[in-house]
Image: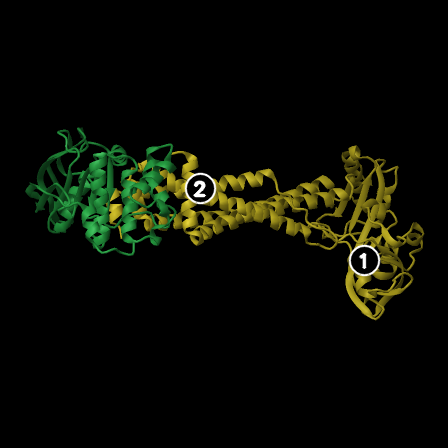
């Protein structure tokens, strides 16, 4: 009996009981669909995060305060207030670190902002003029914090699009006054610019913040100083003049800061973009594996469903097996018939599942995530995996019921009621 | 159409069924010979072992002991797959309950033995077989769309499609009315006379058995009588005398 004949018999048997065939396939459809869709989401998320990190520029270094050790107790990374504004100025001096192009120190704090009868709680970010070039973040309307603003600690602010929206709605925020502060101590700032929308990224929601000159933060808003009378910063962003000089810059900055801080151990961390990229890849990789295993479980459940139905089907069709054997079907013929039937079910189910997975992955791509979308990717390997697994599942879970069917004695099978 | 060639020879056939601790002797050393081209009825009360005999003759079941030659070949020694080939090529089996594949058109049912024989011109041979049992106009009907008599005719078409040397039927008319029974007998007589196919069937009814040229009585797993029928009934004539049915 040829393969084409086997497939024809299998299709006829499936047509004879459409509901049962459909229910069996459903397990396969969902399993394969889930594998394809979830794997494409994992791939898409990875691609999205990678492009976001790359989009910031590839020649960036991020310096953050390290941990300190107090009588042997180590505090958490970044918790120490060891980086100062003066450190940033020193790094910016070409005599100290020649490979550094731009330095953008940042000082963050969360505060309430009131304007136009509305209020919001948001991140106030003290920056210098270099910030926009280092972070590729430019105002859509108006202008960014200028060097003059920083030098004179002027009371100006640039709003992120989300903050502007929640405070002013449809109105034009340019030239308006906003009030920033805690409790009774408030500072009134004039809005000079509006940032372009960037959406929530792996680096936090860049639309939900207000930029002010870093000196204004120090002198008017937070008014905090270290013991040594210097101003703390949260992070120092450094743009290196050339990507090839990244390692040299790390060394220069490291030496400079060690010299300035005179600490026994490094009280700062310098991370390059590659470090962040590999961390992010690790996280998204774990996520993809996680999603894949969930989908794999549903595929397995689908396979067990096929076996279940095939077993029922063998029992239900015992007479049919008897008839086939009575007219000359051999052991192998019966085995092949049920095996092919199981494979046909799982392959058709798998094919529908691929379409479903492709469709849902496209649908997920179409969802707007605040100005951007997750560009899901269906890789050939995901399809190959799903196809292979679905045929394999059919084969594996079909063998047991098929051998049971093939082993039946014709007369017993015919007498079966 | 009788010849001296032996279609079937069984020698000391016995069959023991074990149901738990109880042993049931269905056949106790039964021997008999059937010449090629005979038309035989096997009769006997229920539990006499006649169905067991038919199943063994039809290679659906193996004897516990004894020998069975079909067409000169000893089949009691064959393995499962070789028996399947014998059932496919040499034997056409007709059951009391028809045993057609449900939800499957008559044509596909008749094609079934040809599929396992690896035949090439399946469609035309199946159509021809259905034509011979008078169902040329019902080939696409499914079993549940056919009457009992028609279903049995489909089953006979399936039995003869692979041109067997012998057709075995286990109470082929047991579930049918008189008219349908006569139609079935007419087909058997025609196959026997025109094609020289050996036909053996089991029946309870003496008037059905009267259509054959030899009646074998079985009781307690042994043959109790084996007589030739001097003048057998012609089914075509009986049919002509019956009042016309709706079929």
User: SS of the residue at dot 2?
Assistant: helix
Circle 1 crowding by C-alpha within 10 Å: few under 14, some 14–19, many from 20: many
Quadrant where the image shows the C terminus of chain B: bottom left
**Could you tell me if residue A358 is visible in this image?**
yes
Can you tell which chain is drawn yellow? A
Residue at (71% x, 39% y) in the render: A274
* Cα gap from disc 2 to disc 1, whole angstroms: 55 Å
Indicate whether A395 appears above or below A417.
above
Question: Residue A59's spot in the image, x, y percent?
Answer: 78, 39
Question: Residue A344's spot in the image, x, y percent?
Answer: 45, 42
Can you tell which chain is drawn green? B
Residue on which disc 2 sits: A343
Residue at (32% x, 50% y) in the render: A315
Residue A295 or residue A411, whichever sits in front:
A411
User: SS of the residue at dot 1?
Assistant: helix
Q: Are marks 2 and 1 on the same chain?
A: yes
């Amino acid at each position: 009996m040829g393969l084409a004949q086997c497939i024809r018999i299998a299709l006829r048997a499936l047509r004879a009981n459409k509901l049962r065939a459909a229910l069996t396939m459903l397990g396969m459809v969902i399993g394969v669909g889930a594998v394809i869709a979830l794997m494409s989401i994992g791939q898409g998320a990875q691609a999205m995060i990678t492009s976001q990190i790359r989009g910031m520029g590839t020649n960036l270094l991020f310096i953050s305060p390290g941990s300190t050790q107090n009588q042997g107790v180590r505090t958490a990374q970044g918790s120490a207030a060891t980086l100062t504004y003066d450190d940033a100025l020193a790094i910016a001096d070409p005599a100290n670190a020649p490979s550094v192009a731009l330095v953008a120190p940042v000082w963050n704090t969360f505060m309430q902002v009131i304007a136009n009868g509305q209020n919001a709680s948001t991140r106030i970010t003290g920056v210098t003029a270099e910030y926009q070039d280092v972070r590729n973040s430019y105002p859509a309307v108006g202008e960014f914090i200028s060097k003059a603003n920083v030098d004179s600690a002027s009371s100006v602010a640039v709003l992120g699009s989300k903050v502007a929206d929640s405070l002013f709605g449809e109105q034009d925020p340019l030239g308006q006054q906003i009030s920033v502060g805690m409790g009774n101590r408030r500072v009134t700032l004039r809005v000079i610019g509006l940032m372009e929308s960037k959406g929530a990224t792996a680096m936090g929601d860049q639309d939900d913040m207000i930029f002010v000159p870093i000196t204004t933060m120090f002198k008017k808003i937070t008014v905090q100083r270290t013991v040594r009378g210097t101003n703390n910063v949260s992070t120092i962003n450094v743009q290196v003049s050339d990507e090839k000089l990244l390692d040299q810059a790390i060394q220069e900055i490291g030496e400079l800061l060690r010299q300035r801080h005179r600490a026994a151990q490094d009280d700062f961390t310098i991370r390059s973009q590659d470090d962040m990229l590999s961390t992010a890849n690790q996280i998204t990789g774990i996520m993809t594996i996680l999603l894949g295993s969930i989908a794999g479980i549903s595929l397995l459940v689908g396979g067990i469903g096929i076996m279940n139905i095939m077993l029922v089907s063998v029992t239900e069709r015992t007479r049919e097996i008897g008839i086939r054997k009575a007219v000359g079907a051999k052991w192998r013929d019966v085995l092949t018939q049920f095996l092919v039937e199981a494979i046909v079910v799982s392959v058709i189910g798998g094919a529908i599942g691929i379409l479903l997975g492709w469709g849902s992955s496209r649908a997920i791509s179409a969802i707007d995530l605040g100005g951007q979308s997750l560009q899901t990717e269906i890789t050939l390997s995901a399809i190959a995996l799903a196809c292979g697994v679905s045929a394999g599942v059919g084969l594996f879970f079909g063998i047991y019921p098929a051998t049971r069917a093939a082993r039946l004695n014709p007369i017993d099978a015919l007498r079966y009621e | 159409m009788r010849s001296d060639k032996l279609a079937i020879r069984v020698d000391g056939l016995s069959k023991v069924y074990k149901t738990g601790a109880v042993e049931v002797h269905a056949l106790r050393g039964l021997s008999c010979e059937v010449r090629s081209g005979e038309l035989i009825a096997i009769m006997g009360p229920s539990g006499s072992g006649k169905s067991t005999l038919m199943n063994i003759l039809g290679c659906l079941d193996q004897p516990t002991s004894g020998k069975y030659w079909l067409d000169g070949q000893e089949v009691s020694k064959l393995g499962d797959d070789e028996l399947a080939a014998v059932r496919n090529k040499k034997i056409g089996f007709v059951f009391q309950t028809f045993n057609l594949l449900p939800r499957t058109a008559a044509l596909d049912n008749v094609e079934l033995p040809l599929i396992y024989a690896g035949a090439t011109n399946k469609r035309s041979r199946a159509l021809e077989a259905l034509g011979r049992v008078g169902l040329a106009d019902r080939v696409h009907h499914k079993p549940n769309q056919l009457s009992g008599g028609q279903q049995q005719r489909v089953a006979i078409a399936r039995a003869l499609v692979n041109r067997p040397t012998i057709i075995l039927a286990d109470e082929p008319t047991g579930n049918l009315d008189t008219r349908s029974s006569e139609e079935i007998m007419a087909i058997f007589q025609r196959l026997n006379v025109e094609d020289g196919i050996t036909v053996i069937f089991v029946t309870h009814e003496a008037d059905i058995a009267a259509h054959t040229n030899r009646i074998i009585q079985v009781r307690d797993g042994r043959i109790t009588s084996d007589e030739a029928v001097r003048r057998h009934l012609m089914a075509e004539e009986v049919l002509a005398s019956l009042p016309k049915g709706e079929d």
